[in-house]
Image (cartoon, coloured by chain):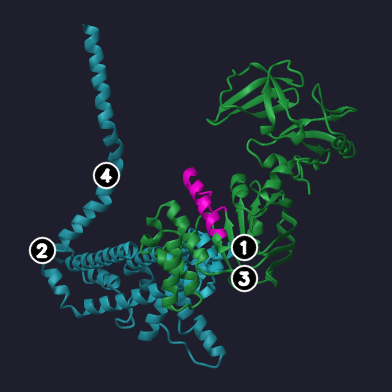
Chain colours: A cyan, B green
Amino acid sequence: MQRAARARKYRLQGAGLDLALPYLMLAPGLTIVLGVLVYPLWDGLRASTRAYRYGSPVADVGFQNYVHLWSDGQFLNSLWVTVKFVALSVSFEAVLGFALALFCLREFQGIRLLRTVLIIPMVITPVVVAIVFRLIYASDAGMLTALSEAMGGGEAQILGNPLNAFIGLVVLDVWEWTPLMFLILLAGLQSLPHEPFEAARVDGAGAWRVFADLTFPMMRPVLAVAIVLRTIDAFGTFDQVFVLTRGGPGEATRLVSIYGYDTAFKFQQTGYAAALFVTIGLVVLALAFSAIRLLRRVDAS
Amino acid sequence: MSSVLFKSVVKNFGALNVLRSLDLAVPDHKFLALLGPSGCGKTTALRILAGLDMPTAGKVFIGERDVTRLQPRDRDIAMVFQSYALYPQMTVAENIGYPLWIRDTPEAERKAKIGEVAAILEIGHLLDRRPRQLSGGQRQRVALARAIVRDPAAFLMDEPLSNLDARLRLTMRGEIKRLCQRLSATTIYVTHDQVEALTMADLVAVMHGGELQQMAPPIDIYDRPANRFVATFVGNPPMNILPAALSEQGVRVGAKIVPLERTRLTACRLAEIVEIGLRPEDCSVAQLGEPGALPGEIYVVEPMGNETLVNVRLEGGNVSVRAGRDFRGAVGESIGFAFDPANACFFNAAGLTAVHRVNSNGREK
């Protein structure tokens, strides 16, 4: 009788530990996620509904911050600059990356080295990239000025001229992030089946028709994923601009990230900045969702 | 349609010698099966003919034309791939019509032609679907339709049936044979399956180790194999090979002396015969001690329904015997092994066939 009771007790203990174990194992990870993701998100949302003075919340203002954004000329301008920047950079990166990936698909002497070299820009710290580009663009001692003077021209005005500064920023981004496109698209190309391409060659297609009829349609899903990824990432571009131009000259390169940073840390309008970033987050989320839906529809048709 | 000719074609992949001087002539309108074990170079030969691989040396002709250096699209051929190689994002109709579309065939003509071949292959109801919505057999038919939609100089098929399940393979085998006969097309068909090769082809070319072993009509490949490799590769179960020695009275196999006709015996002696080859259907099981029977032991018994395959362990090795469907015997039982020497092949030390099977019943040329 006593033995039976003890046996039942052990069994219950075992069952108790078995039930608790998964939660115990989950606990550390869950704590970290709650601490660094969920709480800051909630805190940010709360901050976006408050007004701040000297870094402390002074009043609940509801959605007023959000409403105010759409009549703020500086915000609308920074949004427009960001959209231009993202659209230009990502399209150049997609085209260049695709071309490079197609080129690197063939096998020849030294191809492995070339593939590796092409990926280097992506793994350099963005701030370092920006510093290097500032050295290239600098109007007094920069490489472009040296080049221009060697050819008999004057100083190259890159960062001082609104249009040139914007183009210079796009060039920097294209230089740094084309490798990511290249990498994703190369992996996509390498995973395509061989036989349809051989069949097309036998059926009579030349290089261009093979690309237009087979490669591009088969690569469309991968291309879409790469573009969505890069677009989301480009919306958050901050460090390169911060080092290169700080948003200037004027507002020529002031992306929403820079404007938000200025709002929060220069002008101490924490609530307004939070509302701004929540809005941008929603815009990017909407973009990503519609891109994925578009992708699904293409796939299903 | 055109004839196809390989002239001393060599292919090396680095140090690997895949084809060593292949000479092969396929007459116009003939169905040739390239048969061999994997790695024998048959697929490489086909890819060189298609222009997907370049030969290291040698020339390839389609008709009178030297196509060795031409791009695949300039060779006027159609090919069916093992994996079907359909274009995944195109519909079945677009797949079939692609070779025409790329050649700027007018739309009306293209549509008519697509309808025609779809009807031949009974896939008319699938034209709006995409490849991934099709079963393996249906994809196979689409790949065939895409090949026959034009009227090319030659059809190339690279193991087109090996991705299908056994039953479907049987059906498609018959269908492809009918289709090729109807089109009277020069066809090069690569396969590792001897049944496909023997049943479908007008001519079978057996390859091994990058070399052509023999090219002949199927029945000659079976009855008059050029060497030991062809003899044992073709036939299921394969030909039994036993060591043999020549004596005054005939050929000694184990303890038994097989009497042979004088002409055959002379031929054997001149060729220094060392082995005898026996098809399982020329062998039989016998009572132990029966005159002329070799003593053996039953190794495996495989009832096939219509017959029973008996594997018998002899002193010189194992042999397969086709026995009647009512054969009963237990594994390990002692049994006699008898054979009819009239249809035996004889091989010399180099593995070449010195004296053919079916030598004296009027099939001799």
Same subunit, labels 1 and 4: the answer reads no
Q: Which mark is residue A31?
A: 4
Q: Earlier in the sequence, mark 3 or mark 1?
A: 3
* x, y percent for residue B185: 59, 63
Q: Nearer the viewer, residue B118 or A288?
A: B118
Give me the chain letter of mark 3. B
Mark 2 or 4, closer to the camera: 4
Q: Hey, what amino acid is under mark 1?
A: Thr
**Cα distance, mark 2 to mark 1?**
89 Å
**Cα distance, mark 3 to mark 1?**
14 Å
Q: Hey, what amino acid is under mark 3?
A: Arg
Q: Secondary structure at mark 4?
A: helix
**Cα distance, mark 1 to mark 4?**
72 Å
Residue reaching furthest to the front = B362
Marks 1,4: beta carbons within 8 A: no
Q: Which mark is residue B75?
A: 3
Label 1 belongs to which residue? Answer: B186
The magenta segment is B159-181
Q: Is residue B327 left or right of residue B133?
A: right
Same subunit, labels 4 and 3: the answer reads no
Give me the chain letter of mark 2. A
Query: Overall secondary structure of the magenta stretch?
Result: helix
